[in-house]
Each structure stands twice: as structure tokens, then as C-alpha cells.
């Protein structure tokens, strides 16, 4: 992988992300109003279609080439007992993904999306597999309750690797990127990042993850509180340095997804976010490059309380005409919510392509 110096690479990548294309959005609005339906009768789908047009700069966006970027990594904070499952499950689930037995395998196939599976930093020694890409940065992150998750260089390496993955996929055709992750205990760094970036206490950002009980939830909130106190003392102190926050509080899959989101946005490839963890990566990406927001789409609002805060901070709300497409109390991850929501986006684009106009159909307006 041919890389330029990482810091300049990131600066250039962030600067290259385009804003919404207002002229294209207006043309798409005009196209929608010419179709054989009452104006606005498709409700929120119309706002979704216009946002897709503004992101892609295509009056009639095409979403034929679809991929789920599924990044797996382990977290040192799992040692604090914040998850209902042991850390070994991360590697075991990677094997399950490769065997085609996980929820995301079924849902991605149903939605017509390919899976790009990445070992971003799994602690286990996984066997070689032709469908598993490895980053070789480190095996698992540090315990954020006591130490940085990653060094500055490791964080940049993961971000750059995520960007390179998207660049490689885009070269073969990529119209929409779905984000997915796997990592035992990774709702803990997601909550810590969200607390830091939206200035909210752990009581508002920490949830039950894969299903922990009330005492473990209280303990998890304390762990996130310790991590925040270690890094900055107050939640807003490091708001101007999102990369530092990512290194201190994040993880390898979150950093990799951050780079992937930036690279997709730079290419006007819409990003369909999954749940809390991938949205925390989007928070970091948007803090680095605000134009990222116009290329983000929320597949769902999960059962994690901090997810709603993160989505609101990104402007992905119903009030802004960009709310989550589904509300199913999902808390699985893997990209499952994104795969479930993808058919809605595809259907929306097909309306633009395939519906007749009033003039074509000979229907009076």
C-alpha cells in the first residue's frame, strides 16, 4: 500500500470532501414534481431522494454497486468487565462471517451488497483467508480506562488504511458504502467518543450494549467516566482535536471506519451508517471535515441511548429531513441495520429512474 506521510494525507483528504450539490438537488426536486403523483406524496422518501442527489451530484442517483465495510477489532477495555460476552467472541464471529453464518451475511445477500471483511485489530491469531483483509497495525487497543487506545501513528495508520480500502473498492465500482463493525466491548469506546464530541455525561451515552444487567451498566458508566477524566477532565476540552480523541478513546475498527467515511465522502459516495459504533466513527469524521455530514445517511436509531445524541449532532434527525430510516430497537451491529435499510434507498432511486412523468403518461396535472 503506497502511502504519503500520514498527517498530510489526512489534511488533504479532509480538504477534498465536497459540500452538497445544491443545483443537482434542485433539479431532482423538479424531476420529482414532474412524476405522476401529487407533489410531496412520497413523504420522507422525497427528502431522502433529494439528499442522495445532493451527495452524489447525480439528478437520478444510481446505487447498483453496494458494499458493507465490516471492520473487526478488539478492545483492552473489555478487561473491565463491561460486556456480556468474552473477548474471544470477536475472533469467533470473524470466522462466522467468513463461513456465511452471521446475520449480516444473510441481510447483505438479501440487499444485494457485497461484504468487505477487515481484521482491523482482532486479538486472536486468525488463519489466513482469501476473503479477510488484514491491517497488521496491532492486535487490539489499549484499555481506555487507564491508557490511550492507540498511539497517534497507529490511529493515522488505521484511518489511512480505511481510506485505502474505499479507494480500492471505488476503483472497481462503488455507489454506496454501508458501515459495519464487530468488537466485544466496543460500545464503551463509542460512548466515550460520543460523550467527548457532543459534551454529554456517561449517564446519557452509555447503554446496555449486547445486553448487560443494571449493575454492569452502572459499572460501565463509571469506566467511561474514568476514561474521560483521564483524557480531558471536561468533555469539551479536546473538541478541537478529534484525532487525539480517537487515539485516546477509540479503537482500530472505529479509526478504520473513520478513514473509510472520509474517503467515501471525498468521492461523493453516500455512506449508510449502521448503529452506535459506526456513528461514533462518523462523529469523528465530521469533526475532522464538516462536509462529511451531507454524505451521511442514518439507517436506524438503535436501542443505545447515546446513538440518538450522536445522530442529532450529525444533523441526522427527522426535523432536519434526514432522520433514521428504521426504528427497530436494533443492537446487533455488523452493519445489520444498514443492510435492512438499504432497500429503501434503492427503491427511492428507482422511482426517479422508472416512474413516468405527467407528460409521458398523458396525465393531467
Image (cartoon, helix red, strand yellow):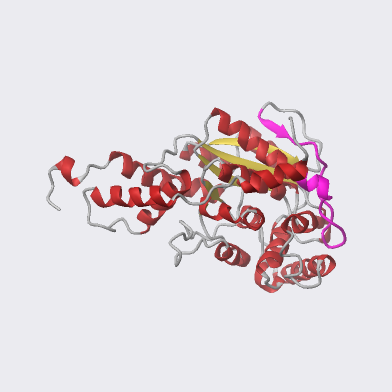
Q: Position of residue 254 (x, y in %)?
A: 70, 50
Name the foreground residue: 289 vs 321: 289
Q: Quadrant of residue 267?
A: top right
Asked if the stretch drawn in magenta spans residue 155, the answer is: yes
Q: Main secondary structure of the magenta part?
A: loop
Q: Position of residue 251 (x, y in %)?
A: 75, 51
Magenta part of the chain: 131-156
Q: Quadrant of residue 44?
A: bottom left
Q: Position of residue 242 (x, y in %)?
A: 72, 58
What residue is rendered at 73% in x and 38% in y?
119
Q: Residue at the far right: name it.
A: 146
Q: Is residue 337 visible?
A: yes
What residue is rendered at 47% in x and 39% in y?
110
Q: Horizontally, is 275 left or right of 71 in the view?
A: left
What residue is rendered at 37% in x and 43% in y?
59
307 relative to 122, above or below: below
107 relative to 150, above or below: above
Name the foreground residue: 44 vs 75: 44
State the count of labels. 0
Amino acid at each position: 500500500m503506497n502511502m504519503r506521510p500520514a498527517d498530510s494525507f489526512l489534511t488533504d483528504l479532509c480538504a477534498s470532501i465536497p459540500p452538497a450539490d445544491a443545483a443537482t438537488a434542485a433539479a431532482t426536486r423538479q424531476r420529482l414534481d414532474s412524476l405522476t403523483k401529487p407533489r410531496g406524496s412520497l413523504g420522507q422518501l422525497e427528502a431522502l431522494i433529494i439528499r442522495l442527489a445532493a451527495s452524489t451530484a447525480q439528478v437520478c442517483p444510481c446505487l447498483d454497486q453496494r458494499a458493507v465495510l465490516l471492520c473487526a477489532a478488539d478492545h483492552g477495555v473489555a478487561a473491565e468487565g463491561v460486556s456480556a460476552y468474552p473477548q474471544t467472541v470477536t475472533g469467533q464471529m470473524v470466522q462466522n462471517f467468513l463461513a456465511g453464518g452471521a446475520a449480516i451475511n444473510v441481510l447483505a445477500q438479501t440487499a444485494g451488497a457485497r461484504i468487505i471483511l477487515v481484521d482491523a485489530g482482532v486479538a486472536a491469531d486468525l488463519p489466513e483467508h482469501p476473503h479477510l483483509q488484514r491491517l497488521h497495525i496491532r492486535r487490539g487497543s489499549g484499555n481506555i480506562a487507564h491508557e490511550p487506545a492507540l498511539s497517534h501513528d497507529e490511529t493515522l495508520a488505521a484511518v489511512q488504511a480505511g481510506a485505502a480500502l474505499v479507494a480500492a473498492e471505488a476503483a472497481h465500482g462503488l455507489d454506496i458504502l454501508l458501515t459495519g463493525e464487530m468488537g466485544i466491548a466496543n460500545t464503551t469506546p463509542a460512548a466515550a467518543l460520543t460523550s467527548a464530541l457532543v459534551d454529554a455525561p456517561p449517564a446519557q451515552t452509555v447503554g446496555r450494549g449486547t445486553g448487560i444487567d443494571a449493575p454492569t451498566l452502572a459499572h460501565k458508566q463509571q469506566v467511561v467516566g474514568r476514561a474521560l477524566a483521564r483524557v480531558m477532565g471536561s468533555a469539551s476540552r479536546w473538541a478541537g482535536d478529534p484525532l487525539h480523541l480517537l487515539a485516546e478513546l477509540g479503537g482500530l475498527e472505529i479509526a478504520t471506519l473513520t478513514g473509510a467515511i472520509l474517503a467515501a465522502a471525498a468521492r461523493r459516495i453516500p455512506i449508510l451508517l449502521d448503529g452506535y459504533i459506526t456513528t461514533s466513527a462518523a462523529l469523528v469524521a465530521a469533526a475532522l471535515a464538516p462536509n462529511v455530514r451531507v454524505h451521511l445517511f442514518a439507517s436506524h436509531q438503535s436501542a443505545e441511548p447515546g446513538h440518538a445524541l450522536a445522530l442529532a449532532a450529525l444533523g441526522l434527525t427527522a426535523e432536519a429531513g434526514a432522520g433514521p430510516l428504521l426504528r427497530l430497537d436494533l443492537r446487533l451491529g455488523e452493519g445489520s441495520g444498514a443492510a435492512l435499510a438499504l432497500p429503501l434507498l434503492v427503491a427511492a432511486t428507482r422511482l426517479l429512474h422508472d416512474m413516468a412523468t405527467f407528460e409521458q403518461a398523458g396525465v393531467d396535472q
